[in-house]
Structures are given as C-alpha cells and as structure tokens.
Image (cartoon, rainbow, N blue to C red):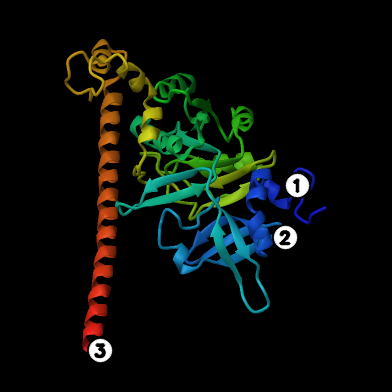
Amino acid sequence: MSQHSSFSTRPRPLARYGWDDAYEHAFAPHHAAGLIPARIVRAERGLCETVTDTGAVRAEIPAAQQSDPLAAPCTGDWAALRPPTDDHAAVLHEVLERRTALVRSTASRTSHGQVLAANVDTVVVTVSLAAPLNHDRTERMLALAWESGAQPVIVLTKADERADAASTQAEVSEVAPGVDVLVTSAVTGEGLDVLTAVLTGTVVLLGPSGAGKSTLGNALLGETLLATGAVRAGDGKGRHTTAWRELLPLPGGGVLLDTPGLRSIGLHDAQSGLEQTFADIQELALDCRFSDCAHESEPGCAVLAAVEAGTLPERRLESFHRLLRENAYAASRTDARLRADREAVKKNITAHLRATYRFRERQQ
C-alpha cells in the first residue's frame, strides 16, 4: 500500500482541522516533491503559524507570496510546506486553491481586497441583543458572508440582557431571507445546542467589537481560550480583544475561527452576495415593468409599489441602493487599478526596448 494511501482508510491528524479526501488527492504532486500539508492558523509579518500532521510549525512566507493582498496566505488556507531542516526554517511553498474566501475591501479603502479567512463553511454573523439593532450593518455582513461561498447564520447574542428576544428574532429574520436566525446566551446556555447542531466544517465568527463573538466562541469550545473584554454601556461597543485570526478545533468536530471585531466592513466585488442578501427585492423586481428597472422612479416598479404598500421597508431599499453604489464604486476602482497596472507593464517593456535599441546603436 502506498505511503499516502486513501484518507478514508488512514485518517490524518489534520482531519481534525478539515483535511479530507479531496485535499489528499489534490496534494499528491506536492507529496511527490517532498512537501508536507499544513493549515495556516495565523499569518503576519512574513511568517505563519501552521498545524501539520506532526504538530505546530512556524514557516517563512516568501516575499513573492505577499505582494497580492487577495492571494497572500491567511488564516484557514491549506498550504504545501517545505519541511524545516537543521539549517533552514520551514518555508511556505504554495497555497492550495481556496474553496471559499471571506473578502472585504482593505481598511485603507484602496482598490485592493483583503481576505479575512479562507476555506470557511459557516459564517456566524453575531448581533448583540444588548445594543441597539443596526440592520444596515447586518445586511452588509450578510452580503460579505454570502459572497464568500459559505453558509451564513445570524446569531443573536446576550439574550439574557433583552426581554423581547423573540420579537427581535422575528425582526432580524425579515432582513435575512434564507438565513437561520438563532437566539443565544453564553451566560444561560440558551440556544447553544441548536447553534451547535447547525454549525458545519470551519466556522468563522464575524461581527463588531462588543457583539460577544469571543464569549460565544468560548461557549462553543467548552473552555476559555479566546480573550474577552467589557463593552461600553452607552452603545454596546467594546475594544478589540482578538488581535488576529486563529483556528481552534471544536469539541464536536469542525474548527472555529475567531476574527477581530470589525469597525468597518467595505464590500469588494460582492454583487452576488448582495443579490442573495436582498433576495426579497430581487423577487419583487421580477414583476417590474422594465427588466432594467433601477427601483428609483420608474413607472411600473414593483419594488417601489411594495414600499408604498408598506410590505417592503423603505430603509431596506435605501440600504440596497447604498450597498450597490458602494460595490460598483469599489469595482470601478479595481478596474482602474488593473488598467494602471497594465499600463505600467507596457511602459516598462517600452523603456526596456528603447534601452536595448540605444545599446545596439552604440555598438555599431
């Protein structure tokens, strides 16, 4: 039998972190090259912490793999490592193709995207019941989650601090078509069994500081492994207690990925995610008189009619328009950057050719 026989007959220790038959098959060429599989736990400053079949390994990330923010190694990535030797540290040779990727625009609002987590199966969007609801932010996070290719779940945290949790659940469900909305409390244990039952694979917690992500994560892990902090009484906001993204195996299977609290979540190429987040508007639009209706002032617009009838909140349509504009602007900036990059390459080639011609002329 081959040393790297079927995953199903010889499970790897990496199975605890999500390794499966498909990854084993895809890794065959890397095995032949003497590389080892690893999952990145966190990556920063040219180094990454990984988990392998033999334990934790710190690996260097070559500069060439850090130039593109969208392709740079990140938490959740599967990678091929050049094993460490007595003389050299382990080196990240290649990142395997991602199944899913949670991407936002960079905090600097450049045209680049930033991958928050890779190969995620479930995105838990946390909404604190101890703070005023912000449906616009929830819709934004749902668009990010849907666009990733993972399955979103909305978790209302801190149910012990709100008397009308059931009515709030119904309210949030109206802005999240096709998404489970669960009520939980890490203090009383309410809803944790239901949440555990719906979580699959690699689970990422997404939400603002103070939403109770780390407290919820500790409840799912069964022990206090994630740092938590107090929140301000006035607005329910907290300071960032998770400084980086990291992976932790869950007791019942799967992996938990906690992320830093996000003060802002910019969309990056999230058209499909927006369409799924606002599926109710997309369905209404099928009855508009014009197929290219923008739902602004056109006659025969079924979406505007629903707003007039009170069956679609005006706030939700405004949020839809706002996020569409933001996404279109981000896409235009990306296109402009790509055009600029192509022009820069052309200029470099032209300059090189001119230098070559001048050199040849001097040799004559």
Give the amino acid type for the residue marked by disc 2 in the picture: Thr
Q: Is residue 297 left or right of residue 65?
A: left
With respect to residue 184, does 14 lie above or below? Answer: below
Where in the figure is residue 118, as x and y percent of width and height?
51, 48
Between marks 3 and 2 in the image, the one whose residue lies nearer the viewer: 3
| SS for callout 3 | helix
Residue found at the very far bottom of the displayed protein: 363
Q: Is residue 14 left or right of 191 when viewed as pictured?
A: right
Q: Residues within 10 Å of mark 3 (few under 14, many from 20)?
A: few
Residue found at x 29% / y 54% = 338
Locate residue 59: give its quadrant. Answer: bottom right
Outermost residue to the front:
364
**Residue position marked by numbered label 2 in the rendering:** 54
Q: Nearer the viewer, mark 1 or mark 3?
A: 3
One can see residue 158 in this view = yes
Label 2 and label 1: CA atoms lie apart by 18 Å
